[in-house]
Image: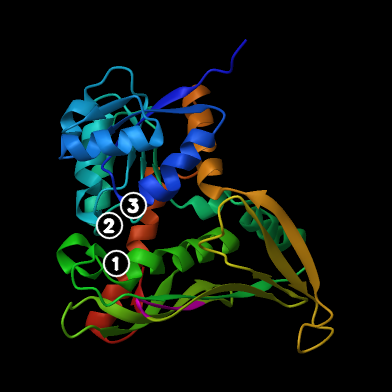
């Protein structure tokens, strides 16, 4: 007997969907990509044909009315996330929405309008990667001692004025695009919410977006998250967990290569250059596929995911506080 699958509908032909997420969903054992929509029917048909998707629609509304669709993947621009996610949920669909789920926490609160029993999850695929899960196991096991510091850096260089990530009106900038990942990392590994934070932001004179942002967040009990993110620095990313007995460092923590093995360095401090550290190889994995399978299982088994609307709102509150700190010029409570 064949395994039961859920049918996915894709809102838009955005690159992240066509290049990464759709192929990953198609590799999920419990998923089938049934339809894709674009505001251009020609573009929708072109992508559908190239990716082997049976149906193509020339409007988002048509896709939402398809009775055969179980789950919607929403990779639209940030300013359209809440509107289309609510519309999909009210049409009886579950939703995986790309991050960040909204432009601010107040907008994210509107997601509570989604019908009860509807799975709505923000697309932080990193939380499903075995590398992150193994690192959290190390934290919980006590091998690192008391973990008191999470440090991260995430950067790339993009000065293209037509790129949506450089448009304020669409929710562009470093914090909204990539700063949300270190925020999730702090919440994930401390298993807590930050109490206050302070930020330092440098804005692009042309785009007005934050092109470089540094943040220190206080999680209480001596626990600190610190990170720098930038849309105009050399491409790089790192994530370190520092404990009283050891540290764990993840190789390529945020954009782990799809379908490839990754590494986790576990360092007990035996040598300052980490030459005596243990290197754990994490088996080949596609974190987007893991995410899709988790969503599918939540739908099939009718049980909520640990990362729903409440979790998404909590993340947005932290992002709001980062910009509030910029306005206030100091520490702000969350």
Q: Which mark is residue 42?
A: none
Above or below for 146 versus 327? above
Residue under label 1, please give it.
320
Nearer to the camera, 42 or 314 = 42
- Label 3: element kind: helix
**In this figure, what is the number of numbered marks?**
3
Residue under label 3, please give it.
15
- Indicate which disc, 3 or 1, sits on the residue closer to the N terminus: 3
Q: Which image quarter is the C terminus in?
A: bottom left
Disc 1: CA contacts within 10 A as few (<14), some (14-19) or many (>=20): some
Was residue 186 drawn as part of the magenta stretch in this picture? no
- Tell me the distance, in whole angstroms, between the alpha carbons under discs 3 and 2: 26 Å
Position in image of residue 234 (x %, y %): 44, 82
- Indicate which disc, 3 or 2, sits on the residue closer to the N terminus: 3
Seen from this angle, which residue lies furthest bottom?
Answer: 272
Nearer to the camera, 21 or 125 = 21
The residue shown at (26%, 42%) is 12
Q: Nearer the viewer, mark 3 or mark 1?
A: 3
């Amino acid at each position: 007997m064949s395994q039961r699958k859920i049918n996915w509908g894709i809102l838009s032909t955005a690159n992240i969907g066509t290049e990464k997420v759709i192929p990953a969903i198609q590799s999920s054992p419990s998923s089938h990509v049934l339809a894709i929509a674009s505001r251009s029917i020609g573009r929708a048909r072109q992508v559908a044909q190239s990716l082997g998707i049976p149906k193509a629609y020339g409007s988002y509304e048509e896709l939402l009315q398809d009775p055969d669709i179980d789950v919607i993947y929403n990779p639209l621009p940030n300013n359209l996330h809440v509107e289309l996610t609510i519309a999909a949920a009210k049409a009886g669909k579950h939703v995986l929405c790309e991050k960040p789920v909204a432009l601010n926490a107040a907008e994210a609160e509107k997601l509570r309008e989604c019908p009860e029993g509807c799975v709505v999850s923000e697309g932080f695929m990193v939380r499903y990667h075995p590398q992150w899960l193994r690192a959290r196991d190390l934290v919980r096991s006590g091998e690192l001692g008391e973990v008191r510091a999470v440090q991260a850096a995430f950067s790339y260089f993009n000065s293209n004025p037509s790129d949506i990530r450089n448009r304020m009106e669409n929710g562009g900038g470093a914090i909204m695009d990539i700063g949300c990942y270190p925020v999730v990392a702090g919440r994930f590994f401390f298993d807590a919410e930050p109490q206050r934070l302070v930020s330092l932001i440098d804005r692009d004179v042309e785009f007005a977006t934050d092109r470089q942002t540094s943040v220190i967040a206080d999680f209480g009990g001596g626990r600190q998250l610190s990170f720098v993110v930038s849309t105009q620095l050399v491409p790089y990313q790192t994530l370190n967990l520092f404990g009283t007995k050891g540290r764990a460092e993840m190789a390529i923590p945020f954009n782990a290569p799809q379908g490839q093995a990754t590494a986790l360095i576990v360092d007990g401090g035996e040598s300052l250059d980490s030459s005596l550290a243990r290197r754990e190889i994490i088996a080949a994995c596609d974190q987007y596929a893991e995410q899709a399978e988790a969503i599918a299982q939540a739908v099939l088994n009718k049980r909520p995911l640990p990362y729903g609307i409440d979790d998404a709102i909590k993340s947005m509150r932290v992002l709001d506080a980062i910009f509030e700190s910029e306005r206030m010029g100091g520490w702000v409570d969350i």
